[in-house]
Amino acid sequence: AVPRQADPQWVAQFGRRAFRRPLTGSERDRYQTLLAKGGPVLVVEAMLQSPAFLFRLEETDQPALQPYAAASRLAFTLWSTLPDEELLAAAERGELAQREGIRK
């Protein structure tokens, strides 16, 4: 849901769902600036036009993002949709960095 007022935490939460991974520091700063200048609708428009939203992260050489890439692969392969909160939380906890976690 899009908030009516500027909520900095919302940017990180919405970005995590839209990009299927946490926002980088520079992304968070950019979208916080958009939020302050144009409100939440502008942030939603910008995120939905971003390559990070449009293209799935399936492989990466960045170790911190590998569990999120696994979460995306699992979700799109099994359910043809974005990773849900439970799958993103498993990636965040590092559970998808091992084969056992992926099987679970």
Image (tube, rainbow, N blue to C red):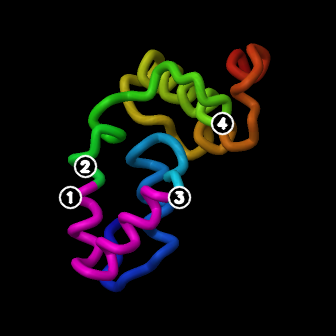
Amino acid type for the residue under numbered disc 3: Gly
Q: Residue at x 59, y 34 (%)?
A: 65
User: Measuring 76% from the left and 20% from the top, which residue is drawn there?
Assistant: 98
Label located before the other in sequence (3 or 1): 3
Q: Position of residue 87 (x, y in %)?
A: 60, 36
Residue 3, image quadrant: bottom left
User: At numbered mark 1, what does the secondary structure look like: helix, strand or loop?
Assistant: helix
User: What amino acid is found at the position of numbered circle 2 in the picture?
Assistant: Leu
Cβ atoms at labels 3 and 1 below 8 Å apart: no
- Where is residue 8? Give x, y as percent: 47, 76
* Mark number, residue 45: 1
Residue where numbered disc 2 is placed:
48
Foreground pick, 40 / 100: 40
If the image is split into quadrants, where does the N terminus sit?
A: bottom left
Between circles 4 and 1, the one closer to the viewer is 4
Query: Which residue corresponds to mark 4?
Result: 64
Residue of label 3: 25
Check the image and report above or below for 95 versus 89.
above
Dot 4 crowding, Cα within 10 Å, few <14, some 14–19, many 20+: some
The magenta segment: 26-46
Label 3 to label 2: alpha-carbon separation: 18 Å
